[in-house]
Amino acid sequence: MQNKLGPLALAFSGGLDTSYCVPKLQEVGWTVHTVFVDTGGTSAAERERIAAQAKAVGAASHHAVDAREKVFDRFVRYLIFGNVLRGEVYPLSVAAERTQQAISVIEVAKQLGAKAVAHGSTGAGNDQIRFDVALRVLAPELQVVTPIREGGVKREESLKYLQDRGLPVPERASAYSVNRGLWGTTWGGGWTHDSWQSPPSELLDPPNPSLPPRDVVIGWQKGVPVSVDGKTYSGAQLVDVLGALCEEFGVGRNVHVGETVLGIKGRVGFEAGAALTLIAAHRELEKLVQTKWQGFWKDHLARFYGDRLHEGQYFDPALRDIEALLESSQQRVTGETRLRFAPGRFQVTGTRSPASLLDRAVATYGEENLLWSGEEARGFARVSAVAPLLAARAQARAESLLGQSGDK
């Protein structure tokens, strides 16, 4: 029965679950080709370790895909445009990257002429939905195989399976489940199952509490961050540079509780300094150059966009329409933002733009202006009060009539 089912592309992380999947799938007849999709946060040494692990557990071939810039261009820039924070806290550090990983694995599977695609997701998390939806939409002809989910395999079983066959077991980097990516690092573990339990010290305490404050200037072109302190970078490079600075200061660490795709509550720790600082800086620059109603409607649609992306529904055509609006909204979001970093915190301390709507030449808030007179301002205030005035009078009449009726 060995290898009679044909070629299969396995989304491979180099961890315990996907290492288990390689020999297990071969055992039932697949020729397994592993695909590692780098969506950020992985060093050259780690990429080499993953390739070596794939070979050691018996992969027919191993394919490494660098998708960091694709993640930025396809997802991250829209998350910045929309200032997307799930629950006003969490910057979707995983959802976009999992969708890109699925897209890249499908591309490799088609190049290989594979008959199936496999992933190592369990039946309890969000990632299975993100992978399965992408596979169903982009490659409905491919069979989807999920050994961990289908077999209800526990970590101890995967470990024993590899050990019994003399196959290498990947070392766990820490006592927690850690997923690193371009847009942030997520932390899981026993403490995330209790909403009252404090995170580990690695998420609470800045690593260098004695660091002096540092100012950094981010340059923007049409809503896209393009430079740090005057030096130009590609999107993914800039996120890496800013992320390293945030990590040094211990900036961007938090805990999020929210709805999972499957409808239960979930809790996750995260470190996403670049995401949080860029979103905060971008929001302040937008306030300087956009009108009130531009911000109002964009924020509404951006929240829906983030929710659908989180739930694995990136391929809904409605998201392409929202992306068009987000793109349009950024035409004047060009300029600079200044951030001050200190251990464990940051602050946006300045914004400037050639398209600024804050114009001291015509008006200064609370002091003077050249666009209207004091009498005109008084008239504006009186007219602005008309609607609530009429409503208050109507309410008073209604209460009076109801009171009289009650007396009788």
Image (cartoon, helix red, strand yellow):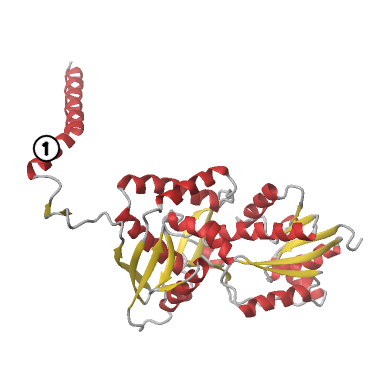
Residue 239 visible here: yes
Residue 140: percent from left, percent from top: 73, 47
Give the residue drawn at x 44%, y 67%: 226
SS type, badge 1: helix
Which amino acid type is shown beneath numbered disc 1?
Gly
Q: Is residue 186 left or right of residue 114?
A: left
Residue 35: percent from left, percent from top: 71, 66
* Residue 373, quarter of the rendered image: top left
Residue 38: percent from left, percent from top: 62, 68
**Crowdedness of circle 1 by 10 Å Cα count: few (<14), some, many (20+)?**
few
Judged from this view, the residue extending furthest toward the right is 1
Residue 169 visible here: no
Callout count: 1
Q: Is residue 40 left or right of residue 51?
A: left
Residue at the disc numbered 1: 379
Which is more toward the observer, 117 or 286? 286
Residue 351: percent from left, percent from top: 30, 64
Which is more toward the observer, 111 or 310? 111
* Residue 216, quarter of the rendered image: bottom left
Give the residue drawn at x 63%, y 52%: 129
Judged from this view, the residue extending furthest toward the bottom is 210
Q: Give the quadrant of the C terminus.
A: top left
* Residue 222, quarter of the rendered image: bottom left
Give the residue drawn at x 79%, y 61%: 112
Question: Measured along the vertical axis of the image, is residue 219 above or below residue 247?
Answer: above
Question: Measured along the vertical axis of the image, is residue 122 above or below residue 322?
Answer: below
Give the residue drawn at x 18%, y 20%: 401
Q: Give the quadrant of the N terminus.
A: bottom right
Judged from this view, the residue extending furthest toward the left is 375
Which is more toward the observer, 294 or 404? 294
Q: Is residue 44 left or right of residue 59?
A: left
